[in-house]
Amino acid sequence: MKRFSVIVLFGVLFIQCDKKEAPEFRLRASLIVSERHTWFQAFEYFSEILEERTNGRMVLENYHSEQLAKELEAIRLIRAGVIDMTNTGSPLSNWVEVLTFCELPFLLRNSTDMRKLIDSDIGKRMEQEMIDKVGLRPLGVFPRSPRHLTSNRPIKHPDDLNGLIVRVPNVPSFVTAWEALGAKPTPMAFSEVFTSLQQGTVEAQENPYPMIWAGGFYEVQKYINQTAHVVSWSYPVIGEKQFQSFPDDLKAIFLKAVEDMVEYEHKLFLQSQQKIISKLEAAGMTFVEVDKDAFGAVAREAIYNSLSAEMQEVYNTILKLRE
């Protein structure tokens, strides 16, 4: 009988010792991209180092391909405290007007223009208004490759669009730009794009190379028309309330891990660009040179006129930054 009691006691102690303590903070991140995208890979790296450096006090669970929510809904869920993190950019202009400049069509020419804007007073204003007006804390930036138009017929000039139904993200400036160019823009969640292209509900879409590859659009689109109409970035973000709930020691660890995540993603980004282009070519996509000046000349006036008087002043200031 005593021997049986010792065995039972040993078993109970073994189970207790083996049982992992629950983390103090269990975070969830919703991302629009697939598991193949550098953003998701960077969040996975962040999850690993965060749990390791906090000794399990913080755990981050990542969900790709809009498994938890589409982009705008993810922002709302973070604000409501239901989930904690995502990656976003221009859709925030639905809450804060100045955020339209992180992804405004035909504004920035290259990564140098982009960095000048991010580091400027306007860039700092954008980040502060994210916190003050949306309740999201930006955690650095993920540069994006330029956005290009994919289609099943070559598009070299705005005249070639001729009513083409183009999927765009739910961003007012994108709708304005493509309407001015003669297309029929259709706002739609990223997770719905492949099926819509496959079924013919939309005829074209525009995204950076990594999103074209990650979305599998090479299976349903023939041409990549190199419009490079948007040079932009995306913010990894956390809810401000969630961040402020962390004790100071975990805040410090969290922010250092964020820095390492951003650096890690940038390395992945640089390594992936040419590889993705090669993969898209191998998958059968044809790259089409376009008249970029013609696209810009048609769209810029409509975009400028769509802005409020205050944002038109900001627009002009950004143009001066490019000089």
Image (cartoon, rainbow, N blue to C red):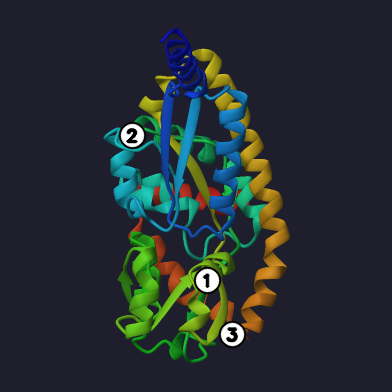
Q: CA distance from mark 3 to mark 1?
A: 11 Å
**Residue position marked by numbered label 3 in the rendering:** 285
Residue 219 position in % (x across, y down): 49, 82
Within 10 Å of disc 1 (Cα), the crowding (few <14, some 14-19, many 20+) is: many
Q: Amino acid at mark 1?
A: Ile
Q: Amino acid at mark 2?
A: Lys
Residue occupying the point 44% across, 51% down: 31
**Residue position marked by numbered label 1 in the rendering:** 212
Residue 132 sits in quarter:
top left
Residue 122 position in % (x across, y down): 51, 40
**Does residue 128 lie above or below 86 as drawn?**
above
The answer to whether 234 appears left or right of 309 in the picture is right
Residue 279 sits in quarter:
bottom right
For label 1, the SS is helix
**Residue position marked by numbered label 2 in the rendering:** 133
Residue 158 position in % (x across, y down): 46, 84
Tag 3 and tag 2, C-beta contact below 8 Å: no
Total numbered badges shown on the rendered structure: 3
Q: Amino acid at mark 3?
A: Met
Towards the viewer: 160 or 308: 160
On the rendered image, what quadrant is the C terminus found in? bottom right
Counting residues from the N terminus, which is met first, the one under dot 2 or under dot 1? 2
Within 10 Å of disc 3 (Cα), the crowding (few <14, some 14-19, many 20+) is: many
For label 3, the SS is loop
Residue 36 visible, this angle:
yes
**Does residue 26 lie above or below 171 as drawn?**
above
Residue occupying the point 48% across, 56% down: 103
The answer to whether 169 appears left or right of 52 in the picture is left
Q: CA distance from mark 3 to mark 2?
A: 42 Å
